Image (cartoon, rainbow, N blue to C red):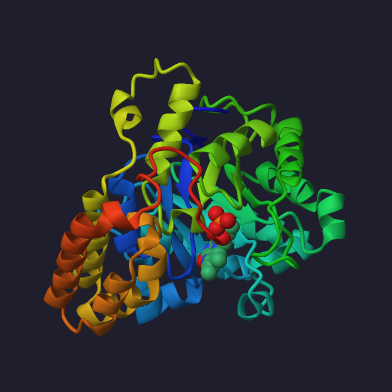
Amino acid sequence: MIGIPLQIGPVRLESNLMLAPIAGWCDLAWRVTTRELGGVGLASTDLLNPRGLLCSSETSLDLACTSDLDQPIGMQLYGADPAMLAEGARWCVDHGATVVDINMGCPVDKVCKEDGGSRLMCMPETAVEIVRQVRAAMPDRVPLTAKMRLGWTEEDAKRNAAGDLACRLVDEGVACITVQGRTTEQRFKGASCREGIRRVVEAVAGRTGSYTGEPGRGVPVVGNGDVKSPDAVLTMLRETGCAGVMIGRGAFGLPWIFRLAWGAQLRALGGTHPDENIDSMGEPSEAEKIEIVRRYFDRMCEFRDVPYALHQLRQKITRLGKSINGSHCRPLKEGIRVAKTQSEVHAALESWEILMRETAPQQRSHPPRQGTPYPLEA
Ligand SMILES: Cc1cc2nc3c(=O)[nH]c(=O)nc-3n(C[C@H](O)[C@H](O)[C@H](O)COP(=O)(O)O)c2cc1C
C-alpha cells in the first residue's frame, strides 16, 4: 500500500507512517520535533499504566502529556485487567487521545509478570475480553488499536499466532494492528521477519476483506521492526503488503526519516501526488540538523524542566549526532556533557556548528549523504 495515507476506523492520517512508542524516546518534545519535520501520520505516547492515570500519578501524567502541536496522538495502555483498561481508555479519550492502543508486545518482565504486554499473546481470551470492554467504553469516533509481536516463541510465530489473535481482535472492533516481526523471546535482537508480518496481513485480509485505504474497507496492518531508511520502508510495504510502517530506533538519529520515506513513496507512485510540499523536502542541511537538536532540547526544557532536558540530551546526543557531520561529534558530546544550563547547551551547539563549518570538508572522507541508505545502528 505505497503512498496511501492510513485510514484507522474513522480517522484518516496524513501518511502511512507512525512514530513508534519507545520508552524514553517518545516524550512530547520528541514527538513534536519529529512531527514538524513532516511525514509522521501518527505518534504515540510511552506505555501508560491505567491505574497511574486514574490516580493522577506524576509519572503517568508526564508520560501522557500532550498538546495541540501533538495531534493526532495515540495513547498506549498496558495491563491485563479489562475493567481497569476500559477506565484508562476513557481517561485517554477525555485527555485528547485520537487513538487508544493496547500493548500486547512488550517483553519486559515488569509488564509481563502482571500478564500485560506480550503475555497477552499467550492469553488470547484475556486479550479479547480487554478489547471487548475497552471498545465498549470508548466513543465510536476514537479507534482502538493493538500492537503485538509474532508470538512469544518461534513456534508461535510459525503457527501465525499473531495472525490468529489479530483476527479475533478485529472481530471485536480493533481498527488497526501493528506487528513487530519478532517474537517475545527475541526481545529486540535478531532481524525482524517480514514473512511473519506478511502472514498477519494475509490473515487479517482473509477475515475483514482486503484493506484499501478507504473508510470501512478492511483493517490496516502496520509493519514494524528494523526500518532505518526510506528504502527499508518501501521494502516493508512491498514485501509484506502492510498498509503502513512504524519506525522506532531508525528515527533516533534521523527524525526526518518520515518525510524522506513519505516522499519516496510519493515518487514511487509516479510523482503526481498532490502533496508536493512533503515530496520536495529532502535531507536537512548540517546547520538544520543542529537546529533540530536545539529545538528538541528547548522543548524538553519548556515541556518538562532544564535538569530533565540536560539529562536526556546527555544520554541521547551520541544517537542524535549520528547523522550530523558524518558522526564526528565528539567535541559536541563533550560540550553537552559539561553544560549545566540551557544557555550552555546553546553555546555548545553554536561552537559545534562553527567548528563543523570550518573543519567538515577536511574531516569528511565522503560528501554529505543525500540519499539512502542511512547507516543507523539499532
Ligand atoms: C528501549 C525500547 C523501549 C520500547 N518501549 C515501547 C513501548 O513503550 N511501547 C511499545 O509498544 N513498544 C515499545 N518498544 C518497541 C518499539 O515500539 C518497536 O516495536 C521496536 O523497537 C521495533 O521497532 P524499530 O526496529 O523500528 O525500533 C520499545 C523498544 C525499545 C528498544
- Say which residue appears at 29% left-offset and 62% top-offset: 29
Q: Position of residue 171 (x, y in %)?
A: 69, 42
Q: Position of residue 85 (x, y in %)?
A: 55, 66
Q: Quadrant of the C terminus?
A: bottom right
- Say which residue appears at 27% left-offset and 75% top-offset: 309
Q: Is residue 255 visible?
A: yes
Q: Answer above or below: position of 308 versus 297.
A: below
Tell me if 63 is positioned left or right of 357 in this view: right
Q: Quadrant of residue 170?
A: top right
Q: Answer above or below: position of 210 versus 147.
A: above
Tell me if 22 is positioned left or right of 38 in this view: right
Q: Position of residue 250 (x, y in %)?
A: 49, 54
Pick the front one: 61 or 359 = 359
Tell me if 163 is positioned left or right of 12 in this view: right
Query: Which quadrant of the render holds ligand 1?
Result: bottom right
Pick the front one: 68 or 228 = 228
Q: Is residue 139 visible?
A: no
